[in-house]
């Protein structure tokens, strides 16, 4: 029994002295392994008399359990100590820079739309929307293009299969809208005057060259109220064009023209000067320069038939409208030479011509 008491003291001090897991495992093997010290005493039990064997056997079993518990708690303590050491010495450097990423750019068309919203928003216009897939009524008939009118052919339209669920043939015939003027009709059908809206959107015609793509963008403007005259049209358009191009004395010229949905109709030209290096400058010609003109949009006083088609009495209300291609104005303002590149989805192009989202031109900047 004294042996067992001494062995317990000895083992306890060996276990508590083991200062890493490897040393602790060596102690375990030396105690409980096949040739371990407790195992060795176990083997002597056979030679004892029954009384001694009983008390020694019990004491050994207790010792075995105590030592096993002690080994377990020492192992837990050593593991915790090892983890504490790693936590104290190892660290992850979260201050490393992120991998460089390409910054996004605002597409020039989106930039132009945002600039126009700002300019017309300041004049009290709000933004209306309409579908890209139109019907014959909204794209043509209601806009005073009667069936068979040559202007329908002029527009090289993408026609779509008829909608069999529509009973009215003019609504059944579907087209990809050839202009945003269809949104004028939708807006007047659903809203009573006074109306002051602009609309932006994709439009479609079967064209493809330096200055034409089958899909392009237009802006439409519609103002309907009592007593609206051509003077309002001229004032609004002149202010808008000068604000958009940021040229206070930009020459603006109204030239009579025909569109079925307006009377009178006018095309609007802006002034530029040809430069000797082959380039051009928007603006007023100096004394020694020739004033040149380029067309940028179509406009006019809304035709009485169009008002009637939308349930508005032309004797009570008048209005003006205009429509403008967004690509052309964007190319002019920002010096982009080829329209087709707008829709190539080439990120190098966007990197060059796109706008930094956090530093974009607006009506408050001088660029
Ligand atoms: N829709 C015409 C086009 O696509 C442009 C246009 C001309 C719109 C005169 C108008 C307008 O609102 O009054 O060529």
Image (cartoon, helix red, strand yellow):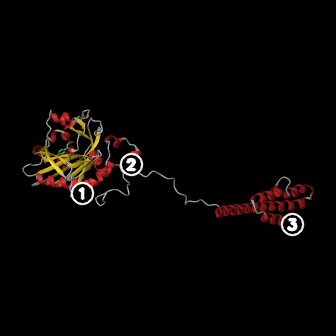
Residue at left offset 19%, top offset 41% = 138
Judging depth in this view, the residue of 215 and 334 nearest the camera is 334
> Which secondary structure lies at badge 1?
helix
Q: Position of residue 140 (x, y in %)?
A: 18, 39
Q: Position of residue 311 (x, y in %)?
A: 12, 47
How far is disc 2 from disc 1 in space, using C-alphas?
29 Å
Q: Which mark is residue 91?
A: none
Q: Position of residue 22 (x, y in %)?
A: 77, 57
Q: Which marked residue is nearer to the observer: mark 2 or mark 3? A: 2
* Quadrant containing the N terminus in the rendered view: bottom right
> Which secondary structure lies at badge 3?
helix
Q: Which residue is mark 3?
A: 6
Say if 314 sits above or below 124 in the image. above
Q: Which mark is residue 352?
A: 2
Check if mark 3's residue and mark 1's residue have beta carbons within 8 Å: no
* Quadrant containing the C terminus in the rendered view: bottom left
Sequence-wise first label, 3 or 1: 3
Sequence-wise first label, 2 or 3: 3
Q: Position of residue 61 (x, y in %)?
A: 81, 59
Q: Which residue is mark 1?
A: 121
């Amino acid at each position: 029994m004294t042996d067992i008491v001494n062995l317990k003291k000895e083992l306890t001090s060996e276990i508590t002295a083991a200062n890493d897991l490897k040393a602790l495992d060596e102690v375990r093997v030396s105690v409980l392994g096949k040739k371990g010290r407790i195992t060795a005493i176990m083997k002597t039990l056979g030679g004892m008399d029954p009384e001694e064997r009983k008390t020694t056997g019990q004491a050994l079993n207790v010792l075995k359990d105590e030592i096993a518990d002690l080994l377990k708690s020492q192992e837990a303590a050593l593991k915790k100590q090892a983890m504490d050491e790693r936590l104290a010495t190892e660290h992850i450097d979260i201050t490393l820079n992120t991998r460089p990423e390409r910054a996004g750019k605002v597409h020039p068309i989106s930039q132009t739309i945002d600039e126009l919203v700002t300019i017309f928003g300041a004049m009290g216009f709000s933004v209306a929307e309409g579908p890209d897939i139109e019907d014959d009524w909204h794209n043509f008939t209601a806009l005073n293009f009667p069936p068979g009118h040559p202007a329908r052919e002029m527009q090289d339209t993408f026609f779509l299969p008829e909608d069999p669920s529509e009973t009215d043939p003019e609504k059944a015939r579907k087209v990809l809208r050839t202009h945003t003027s269809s949104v004028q009709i939708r807006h007047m059908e659903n809203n009573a005057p006074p109306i002051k809206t602009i609309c932006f959107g994709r439009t479609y015609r079967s064209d493809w060259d330096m200055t034409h793509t089958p899909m392009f963008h237009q802006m439409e403007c519609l103002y309907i109220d009592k007593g609206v005259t051509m003077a309002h049209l001229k004032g609004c358009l002149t202010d808008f064009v000068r604000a958009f191009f940021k040229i206070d004395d930009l020459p603006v010229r109204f030239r009579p023209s025909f569109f079925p949905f307006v009377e009178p109709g006018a095309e609007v030209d802006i002034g530029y000067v040809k430069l000797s290096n082959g380039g051009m400058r928007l603006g007023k010609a100096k004394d020694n320069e020739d004033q040149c003109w380029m067309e940028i949009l179509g406009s006019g006083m809304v035709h009485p038939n169009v008002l009637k088609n939308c349930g508005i009495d032309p004797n009570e209300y008048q209005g003006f409208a205009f429509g403008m291609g967004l690509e052309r104005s964007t190319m002019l303002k920002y010096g982009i030479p080829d329209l087709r590149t707008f829709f190539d989805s080439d990120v190098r192009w966007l990197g060059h011509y796109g706008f930094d989202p956090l530093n974009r031109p607006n009506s408050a900047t001088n660029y």
